[in-house]
Amino acid sequence: MRIFQDGKYYPIEIKKHGTPDSNDVKAFKIFAKNETIGFGCEICLVSDLQPLSPDVMAMSIWDI
């Protein structure tokens, strides 16, 4: 899913596991080739905020 606001796309991915890693958000880089991308987020079952890359964080489904 992507949210468009102020000329940027903000990618969001939803996963059902609790151990996210940087491989989960590879697709975000594909969009960056053609569009302006903002900060991204992976929503999953992780217990705390966890950085996956400089511009993508994993956050708990229970925090939203």
Image: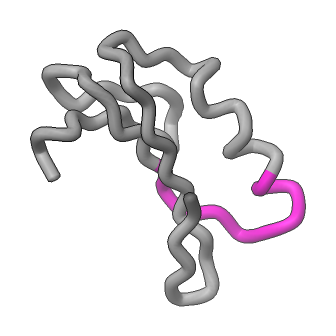
Question: Looking at the figure, which quarter contains the N terminus?
Answer: bottom right
- Residue at (32, 30) in percent of width and height: 44
Q: Give the image location of residue 29, x and y in percent.
A: 75, 43
| Front-most of residues 36 and 31 | 31
Q: Is residue 61 magenta?
A: no
Please tell me whether residue 12 is drawn above or below residue 26 in the rendered image.
Answer: below
Residue depicted at x 79% and y 69%: 35
Foreground: 54 or 34?
34
> As drawn, which residue projects farthest toward the bottom?
6
Q: Is residue 10 above or below residue 45?
A: below
Q: Quadrant of residue 37?
A: bottom right
* Residue 40 location (% of width, % of height): 49, 50
| Residue 21, image x, y percentages | 49, 16
**Residue found at x 48% / y 56%:** 39
| Image height of 28 relative to 53, above or below | below
Q: Residue at x 37, y 10 (%)?
A: 19
Give residue 59's position: percent from left, percent from top. 27, 36
| Numbered range of the magenta stretch | 31-40
Q: Is residue 17 left or right of residue 7?
A: left
Instruction: Using residue 36 as the reference point, say whether residue 1 is left or right of it.
Output: left
